[in-house]
Amino acid sequence: MLNNPLFCRLAPALLLVIAAGLFPAFGALADEARLVVDKAVWTNGVENLEHMQVYGKTAPGAPLCLWMRLKGSKWALQRLHNAGKLPIYHQWFRHSVVGVSSEGVTEAIDHIQIPAGNVQLMEQLGRELDVRGYFDWRTWSIKENVKRGKWVVKVTYADGEPVLCAGDKACVYEIVVQ
């Protein structure tokens, strides 16, 4: 068949038709293969799994909480677990304010494991996955004693790699405590 002249003339067009049909599927598989931060907000606390008061770019002080809703598929959870990427962490950094400039900080103040993706919770997530086909997980980390300055939280996997957000950029959240 490969030596057939008709096949040789049609093969390039056939490959384009096959490729055009498969690429959207590859994109969908890529989306299913990862966790998605569906929503993230700075807040002063959490009640009944929901965030309380929402802060914009500034917060008045303690407590300070980064609340987020993660979504993902069963396949994503299994792949991440098998790759050693779970659990997920919030790395808290503080840039102290001196005058009008901020001093950079390279080491995390806190490395807080958040429950989303925790291996012990896989059974609970499994029930949600069986019913809906995906999970919708609310999680957060909180700092009771925050000083004035710029605070940054980086969302990372257990291996230190960043969790990716929209535009395939690392999930990094910043706020200034006044």
Image (tube, rainbow, N blue to C red):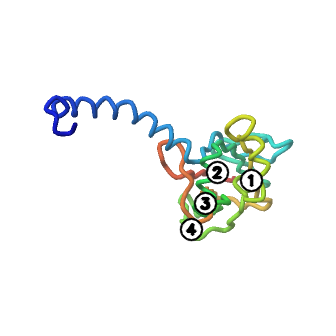
Occupied quadrant, residue 127: top right
Please give the residue where the numbered disc 2 appears in the rendered image.
Answer: 77
Q: Amino acid at mark 1?
A: Met
Residue 59 shown left or right of residue 160 in the figure? right
- Residue named by callout 1: 122
For the residues labelled 2 and 1, say whether their Cβ atoms are less than 8 Å apart: yes
Image point (46%, 39%), residue name: 27
Q: Alpha-carbon neighbours of circle 4 within 10 Å: few (<14), some, or many (≥20)?
A: few
Q: Residue furthest bottom?
A: 107
- Mark 2–mark 1 Cα distance, whole angstroms, equals 8 Å
Alpha-carbon distance for marks 3 and 1?
12 Å
Image x and y of residue 80, in percent: 60, 56
Q: Earlier in the sequence, mark 3 or mark 1?
A: 3
Q: Residue furthest right?
A: 48
Among numbered discs 4 and 1, the one appearing first in the sequence: 4
**Residue at image point 60% right, 48% down:** 76
- Reading the image, the residue beneath label 3 is 82
Measure how far apart labels 4 and 2 are at the Cα level: 32 Å
| Residue that numbered label 4 is attached to | 105
Element type where label 1 sits in the image:
helix
- Tell me which label, 2 or 1, sits earlier in the chain: 2
For marks 3 and 4, the one nearer the N-term is 3
| Helix, strand or loop for disc 3 | helix
Q: CA distance from mark 2 to mark 3?
A: 9 Å
The amino acid type of the residue labelled 2 equals Leu
In which quadrant is the N terminus drawn?
top left
